[in-house]
Every structure is written in structure tokens, then in C-alpha cells.
Amino acid sequence: MSRVIGIDLGTTNSCVAVLENGQPTVISNAGGYKTTPSMFAITQDGKRLVGHLAKRQAITNSKHTVYACKRLIGRRFDAPEVQKSIDLSPYDIVRGPNDDPRIEIGGKAFTCPEVSATILREMKRVAEEYLGEPVSEAVITVPAYFNDTQRQCTKDAGKIAGLEVLRIINEPTAAALAYGFNRPGEERVAVYDLGGGTFDISILEMSDGVLEVLATSGDTFLGGEDFDRRVVQHLLDTFRESEGIDLRADPMALQRLKDAAEKAKCDLSAREQTEVNLPFIASGDDGPRHLSIEISRDTLERLVEDVVSATLKTVEVCVKDSGLQPGDIDQVVLVGGQTRMPLVQSKVAEYFGRRAHKGVNPDEVVAVGAAIQAESLLSDEDSVLLLDVTPLSLGIATFGGHFARLIERNTTVPVRKGHIFTTTRDNQSAVKIRVLQGEADAAAENDLLGEFVLTGIRPARKGEPEIDVSFDIDANGIVSVSARDLATGKEQSITVNATGTLSDEEIQQIIEDQELYEVALKEGEE
């Protein structure tokens, strides 16, 4: 029987783990690093690079180097988050045929699941080299606040990478699994997960091998990348004031600044002051110009204080949804590299009235939890019972543009719920079922997951036919919807396949293209 791996597919870095002799092991890549940059690039001669190799050439090849793709996956092209990414990214983001954002490199448009698949394929390769055997099954983590489309796209990415995705698991839940591994007793735990591109908060209850999520909330477009951009903006403004040169139009300079900003941010977690030194950053009338700027921890905290405050507002909503008070929480677990920042730690400690637990590695704990879940799915022993929730309300659009919720947010999954609806016109023979996800009362303000038409309704006066609409959410958080006319028994159902997800034919084509590339690469090396 082949081994099952757990993969944390992160915005900035990814990580893979496996259980060995009952203990989780985080697997190092060929360079000895336990995390791998979630970056993908194509060189001038058409070679594809992943991870550290892609990151090393990002400054000289910024237009053809993709990072933070996770922030785009499963979104519509016109979404505000995608438009913001277009303005800020050095690579080209274009509209795809499914109204999805795609990344254009050298005349080829890559889908977001395709780019994510290159990262997953690299994590698969790292695991196979370590284990000495092929790996075909995995548990992959996603932000708790990912909607159905984003989860579907992540599952597509796994398929393209050659992995059967046994389960999609929420990142904070995975972290809680790792924290609670072989830990006796009852505890209420808050997992505060601030990663490179996303933020999640989950409140969980742990007791005798049962892990129950009470509530979850988050923001899929808030993370360390936003901290980095605040620092870049500060460096750009300071350099323009002192030298009179605006570097915003220089892609290479911007990439150098991004790398320097990330390093300075990390340095300031351990030091009170650091210096950003970038020689030959620009040319002026009197020769080359160099950037040398001192940044203090106080300056950094002033630049990002509102971002940290935004996370705490989300925490407040989640705690309220859980039915608890901050003082009811026994332990706070910090997850994600950005939680190393002293300001984040102090603000979280201030809110909950207790210091965070220091016993987990914020970069590795999610992959460890995924590996624990992977092993429990295959094991005959019921070592862990995991009760997760759906992060967003689900329902359908009704007459007058209203949103009728069938499943409220923070409902334990898997779940199936139904409701009886009726017609709005006399002798109406068909109804369109529009499946929505979100929290707004107006249908138009929520995410459209998909739609289908139920036909063959018997002729009758409006309000008489009874149409039973049922929602089914599986353990991965993926949605199926059915509608049935109770009088005629006519039924129509879909597994929601929203805008931005790929058809089986498209997935197969991407897999074939990858195989052709690998064959051509081998022939070129011989």
C-alpha cells in the first residue's frame, strides 16, 4: 500500500509531511529546507522552474515568475481581489474563457489550478525522493474561508499533479489536529492563522479524540503579502523624496524591493532596527543611485497596524459565532509565518487575555496536521473524529432578488438540508435554481456557485407546485444541489461546477501538455 502525504499548499511557501511509525515527519527538499517557495517560472529558453529555483531568478525574470497564485485561484476575473493583483503583480493576468483569471507567460495562458499543480507536483516529488516509492494520494489544506469554487480548483490542481485528493481540510483545523496529537484532556482552542496571503480564525473544542470546530471566519485576501507591500510602498516613497526618482515603473527594481521588504520584515521580528541596502537600484543624470534606508520596528508597526486590527475584528466575529467569550478559550495557537511578528503576538494575547502556545512550528504545523488526517483516513483505528464546519452560508436566489439560506455558516459538515419552494407564475413549467454562497441578504451580492433548470413541472396556479431543493455538503466542503417536483417526481441535480473550475476535458488536456513538456525536456537532455 502506497503512503499518503499531507500537503500545506501555501501562498508564499508550501510544505509536505508524512506519518512514520506513528509520528509526523516534515520532509525536507533537496536543498535541506522544510518549506518550498510557492513560485513557478519559465526561463527565456522555455524551461520551467519551481520553488527555490524559481525564486532565485525572480529579480532578473520578474515578468515570467509567478508567486501568490493562491490569491487568484477560484475567483472571477472581475473580482476586486483579481483587479488589485493585476495592478500589483509583475506578471500578466488575463481573462480566461471561463471568466477566470489566467497567467500569461511567453504567449501561453496558464490556469491557476495548473500553476498550483506545479507546486503540488514538486511537493509530491520531494516526498517520493524521501520515501523511495511513488506517492499517489494526498490530503491538501486550504484556508478555512475558501468558498466552494476555490476548494474545487484546489482539488483540480491535485488531479493535474497526479494526486488523488482524499480530503480537502481547512488549515486551522489541520493545525489543531497537530496541536492535539496524542494530547489528552479537554480544551477549547483558538487557531489564529495569518499566512502569506490569507487569514483564518477557528474556534475548536477538543475532547477524547474528538475535534469539533465551533466556528470559523477569515479573509482570503489578507496576509503577509500585504505587510510586504506596505514596506515596499514606504521604501518607494522614501527613495522618491530623497532622490527624486520613482521606481514604480521598473519591474526589476520592484522585485528587488519586494525581496528586501520581506527580509526586513523578518529581521524586525528579532531586532529593533534594520537597514535596507540595494546598490545600483536606479540611474540618474549623474550616474547610478543606491537605496539605503533604515527601518525601525516602530515604523513597521505603524505601517501595518490597521491590517493587524482588521484580523482582530474577524476574530471577534468568530468568537461570537462560537457562543463563547475570549476568556473561555484555554489555548491560543498561532499559525503562519506572519505570526512571528511581535505586534501580532501582543495584539492576539491582549484580545484573548493569554499568551499564545509556543509548542508548534507556525510554518510546518498545517502540513503535520494534514499528514495526521491522511493517516487517520486510511487507518482502521478511529484515532481522531473530525467535525468541521462550512465557512459560508449556502442557499438559492428567490423571487425579488433575495437570498434564501438553506445552510447557515458554521454548520457541521457533512450535512444535507432541504426546503420546499414554489412557482411565481401560473402554469410555470420550469424553474431556474441559482446556487449562491455568502452572507448578504441580496442574492446579487453573494457568490454564484452554479445554476441549473428543473423542467417538467405540472401546469398549476402559482404557489401550488411544491419543489424540494436539497443541499449536500461533503467532508471536503464541496457542494451538490438537487431539485425535485414533489407532484411529478421530476428531479435535476448538479455537483456545483462554478465559474473558474475546469472541465474534465480541460484537466486532461493540461495533463497531456505537461507530459509532452516532460518528454521534450528529456529528449533535450539526451
Image (spheres, rainbow, N blue to C red):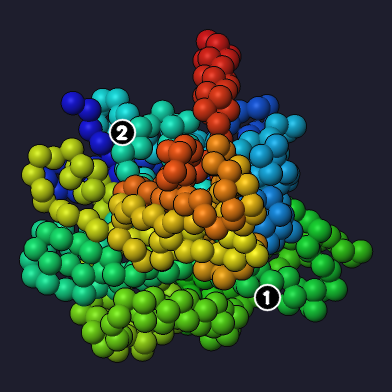
**Residue depicted at x 71% and y 68%:** 291
Residue 65, compared with residue 393, is above or below; it is: above
Which residue lies under the disc numbered 1?
A: 234
Which image quarter: residue 379? top left
Q: Earlier in the sequence, mark 1 or mark 2?
A: 2
Q: In this view, does 29 lie above or below 362?
A: above
In the rendered view, does 96 fall on the left or right side of 449?
Answer: right
What's the amino acid at mark 2?
Glu
**In front of the other: 415 or 209:** 415
Residue 27 appears in view: no
| 87 vs 218, nearest the viewer | 218
Q: Which residue is drawn at 31% across and 33% down?
A: 137
Point out residue 126 in the picture as x, y percentages from the top left corner: 35, 35
Q: Is residue 51 above or below residue 195?
A: above
SS at badge 2: strand
Label 2: which residue?
A: 137
Whole-Å distance between the Cαs marked 1 and 2? Answer: 44 Å
- Mark 1 residue element: helix
Which of the labelled discs sits on residue 346, or is there none?
Answer: none
Q: Are marks 1 and 2 in contact (CB under 8 Å)?
A: no
Left-right relation of 492 to 77: left
Q: Who is closer to the viewer here, 238 or 144?
A: 144
The answer to whether residue 419 is left or right of residue 175 is right
Q: Where is residue 474 in the image (x, y as percent from the top left)?
A: 34, 47
Q: Where is residue 479 in the image (x, y as percent from the top left)?
A: 43, 48
Name the residue rendered at 30%, 52% in the picture: 414
Image mark count: 2
Farthest residue toward the right? 285
Q: How crowded is mark 2: few (under 14 residues within 10 Å), some or many (20 or more)?
A: many
Q: Which amino acid lies under the numbered mark 1 shown in the image of this protein?
A: His
Q: Can residue 407 be seen in this view?
A: yes
